[in-house]
Amino acid sequence: MKLSLAPVPFYWSVEEIRTFYDDIARTPVDIVYLGETVCYKRRGLHLDDWMEIADGLAAQGKEVVLSSLVLVDGEAEGKATRRLCANGRYRIEANDMSAVGLSAGTPFIAGATLNIYNEHTLALIAEAGATRFVAPIELGSAALMTLRARAPSLECEILAFGRPALAYSARCFTARNYDRGKDACERICLDHPEGMLVETQEDEAFLVLNGLQIHAARPLNYATELDSLRHAHIDILRIMPEKTGTDRIIDAFHGLVAGRYTQDQVTTQLAPFAPTGSANGYWRGQAGRLTCL
């Protein structure tokens, strides 16, 4: 079972991004996904810059994948997706059907936002050239075992730790919070490198606003599900980047998979990254925000 690191979903400065991946190169993560997936206006790094970071990670033995935008709703986004798919060196994580079409039969990874919920969709994506699919977060063990049985040759990846994206929009949730339109956002997301926390009237952490996306406030945490993940033939455990401490999360899961750490040790290591609790309900076929022991 391998470990992967999802693309950074938040808006960080160029210096922060470069420093982050310099640190990631020294971790035992196997696969690193790179690129801007949320908003085309976050253009601190261009494709050549991402390729430079990719080459550095590949030199350290990492498998590198370039991730496409989740929403392609304009000419600029279309051109950026076309350039990404034509990079000629690294596989693409297709997060929009336009990226699937632009891959033109070249092997690619099907992102979770392609909404692969049944064997018919999975077969269609595999025929288009997918060699791996990232499961939608709502799919539990029973559903994924069914899918894996119908397409055993495709690698299956699942989000194992991190705050999942729950909703996507062509409008910017963060800009709206400041009474600004999407085109006049002034890149306000830079002021919120971990997103904007939304609480209920009872002061309970509820959601995180992140530009065009809304994330859950509580992270998914499948560290307690290692045996059932193996039973379901999950090939890759995905980790969402954190502003600080991502290396510690990677180490915790790497140690768990390798048998170096006990479940109790991993629970202790991950606790600082889930101050309001974590969830594994989806995997158990329950409401996603539940913690099922």
Image (tube, grey):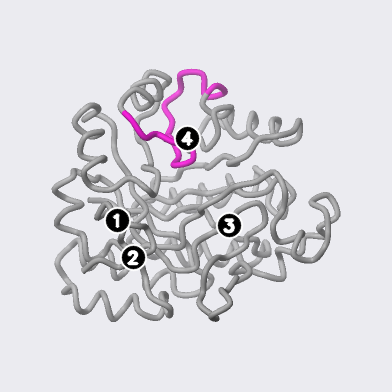
Return the disc, 3 or 2, that comes first in the chain's sequence: 3
C-alpha separation, residue under disc 1 versus residue under disc 2: 7 Å
Hey, what amino acid is under mark 1?
Gln
Hey, what amino acid is under mark 2?
Leu
Q: Name the residue at 51% across, 48% down.
A: 54
Q: Which residue is mark 1?
A: 286
Q: Which residue is mark 3?
A: 214
- Which class describes the residues within 10 Å of circle 4: few (<14), some (14-19), or many (20+)? many
Measured along the vertical axis of the image, is residue 82 above or below residue 220? above
C-alpha separation, residue under disc 3 versus residue under disc 4: 17 Å
Tag 2 secondary structure: loop
C-alpha separation, residue under disc 1 versus residue under disc 4: 22 Å
- Which class describes the residues within 10 Å of circle 2: few (<14), some (14-19), or many (20+)? some
What label sits on residue 290 in the rendered view? 2
Labelled pair 1, 2 in contact (Cβ < 8 Å) = yes
Labelled pair 3, 2 in contact (Cβ < 8 Å) = no
Q: Which residue is nearer to you in this view: 169 or 37?
A: 169
Labelled pair 3, 4 in contact (Cβ < 8 Å) = no
Return the disc, 2 or 4, that comes first in the chain's sequence: 4
Q: Which residue is mark 4?
A: 114
